[in-house]
Image (cartoon, rainbow, N blue to C red):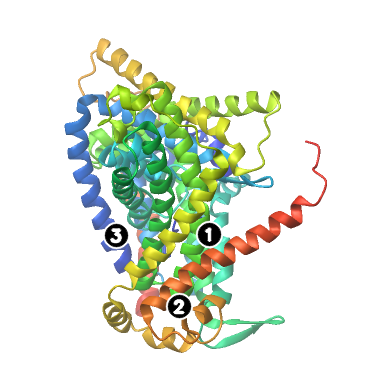
Amino acid sequence: MGGGLRHRGALHLLVERDSPVHRARPEAKVVALVLFAVALAATPERALAAFALHGAVLALVAGAARLPAGTVRRRALVALPFLGVAALLPFAADGPRVALGPLAVSEDGLWAGGALAARAVLGATAAVVLTATTSVADLLAGLAHLRLPRVVVGIVASMLRYLDLVADQLHRTRLAMAARGHDPRWLWQARPLAAGAGTLFVRTYERGERVHQAMLARGFTRRLPDLRPPPAGAPAIGWAAALAPALVSLLVAVGAILR
Amino acid sequence: MLAMHAPDGFLEPGVAAVTALASLAVMALALRAAGRDLDDRQVPLAGVAAAFIFAAQMLNFPVASGTTGHLLGGALAAILLGPWVGSLVVGVVVLVQALVFADGGITALGCNVLNMAVVPAFGGWAVFQLARRLLPRSAGGVVGATAVAAGASVVLSAAAFSLEWLFGASAPVPFDTVFGAMVGVHALIGIGEGVLSAMVVSAVLAARPDLVAGARDLAPAQLVDRPRVSARAFALGGIVAAAATAAAVSQLAADDPDGLERVAIEQGFADQAEAHRLAGSPFAEYATRGIDDETLSLAVAGLAGVALTLAVGGGLVVAIRSRPRAVV
């Protein structure tokens, strides 16, 4: 799913603002995102009010973070393919039919599709808010704080570091091919493209070897240093305040289940 | 790619929890095994490999008549890096996609890691090893086995997804419909995946054969033997492999029909599934028209999915092809 987002690179996702959401501890924000996603998943399909409240909670947080609505909306477009699936469900599911305009669609499928669309959009938007208010370095430190194995944190770190580079190389190869008249239209004409990707793998791997040598030369001890600048300005927002919106959503979900 | 990245709330919480536990366990094992394989080099190397898989997923390749698809890379990662490091790397890619790029749900992370990393890497690796035994011990054999394994891995992912749907669907869509559609569509996607992965491995073998984990057992002399296979023959082989896998996977899924039915009854939607199988989607009709045997009916549903999608895709291609080609 080639969302437009991927092409922008991971290191340019932060929208720099001074807001309580930006200042919240990254690990608390990650936990809040997970709790919010759990609340979304737990909310019953037909609890329209609950989904509206989830949306309101999210809008409040995004508003408090002073994120431009257009940016959030554009990045949340990554959920678009799921909306396509959601749109199929009323037709693919069975059960009693209801009229939707000129069409007779499955009532259960309609609810399931609607809920799926709501969850996908809200979940993606919440993740967008996280990455728009948290720098990659902070996010990595937060993940390390949450006891994600440091090897995994290290892999994620070097992946994000070299992602733009590798993607750029691939893009340039593609461009160079097009400039020389290579415009494949059938699968069996894709060999130069694939060969380019294979070569890119070799070059990427060799880059990894060089990076490792360079890291060793600089005293790498299998543990990535915390490169975050010391926090400036207002103090970090505590756990309770950072988790509050997600906890509200959880309560809403529990309330909707019990009703 | 159809819905392979599940969003939040796509599957029931129970399935989300079980798949999360399974993925977590495999990733923990992979971490230990990868540590043994790669030592501390794993951090930057696995990182750039993950960046490569991520970039490869952005690489649009032509499918037919100007339409494009993109690599999934699970089996490719396993063959290049070994199944443990490969699944770990793709798992990290899926994690980053969900957390940083909002692609795929947070609560569906376990299911997504299972479908996109664990199943393709280990399933693809198993098929790869199997195919290696049947094919000559040469670079050509490795490339051919890669094609089969990568194609099969996509179909296996689709089958895994359908099984998860059977256990915890969020909407009452019959299993046969989901299975037929998923496996059928992905058998086609698998052709592209197989051809592309094989070409990538072929290029890596030519430059740095030591970087292909799946070819470590070959002596340098055996690697020189690189018969050139026409890409057209390749694509044809891919179609055969995809169809065979679709049929085989259907058999596996229906191996214990009683068990599946029992689960379905426990899940409480067996009645709906039974009632609906006679109505609605074409796949449902394919699955039951005059065929009482569950095993056969599933296989037919899977194959019908392949055939239907091929026919529709072929028709589209022919329709587009007759028009004069646009100047780019």
What residue would you read off at disc 3? B19
Mark whose residue sits in front, 2 or 3:
2
Position above or below: A13 against B189:
above
Label 1, label 2: how many angstroms apart (C-alpha)?
19 Å
Which quadrant holds residue A222? top left
Point 49% across, 25% down: residue: A165
Q: Is residue B215 left or right of residue A83?
A: left
Point 49% across, 32% down: residue: B228
- Kindly identify which numbered label has been placed on residue B174: 2
Residue B29 coordinates in the image, percent (x, y): 19, 45
Residue A85 visible: yes
Point 36% across, 53% down: residue: B109
For the residue marked with disc 1, what is the amino acid?
Phe
Pointers 2 and 3 in contact (C-beta within 8 Å): no
Which quadrant holds residue B267? bottom left
Point 52% across, 64% down: residue: B306
Q: Report crowding for label 2: few under 14, some 14 to 19, many 20 or more residues within 10 A (C-alpha).
A: many
Residue A44 visible: no
Residues at marks 1 and 2 on the same chain: no
For the residue marked with disc 2, what is the amino acid?
Pro
What residue would you read off at disc 1? A82
Residue B56 coordinates in the image, percent (x, y): 48, 37
Residue A177 coordinates in the image, percent (x, y): 64, 26
Pointers 1 and 2 in contact (C-beta within 8 Å): no
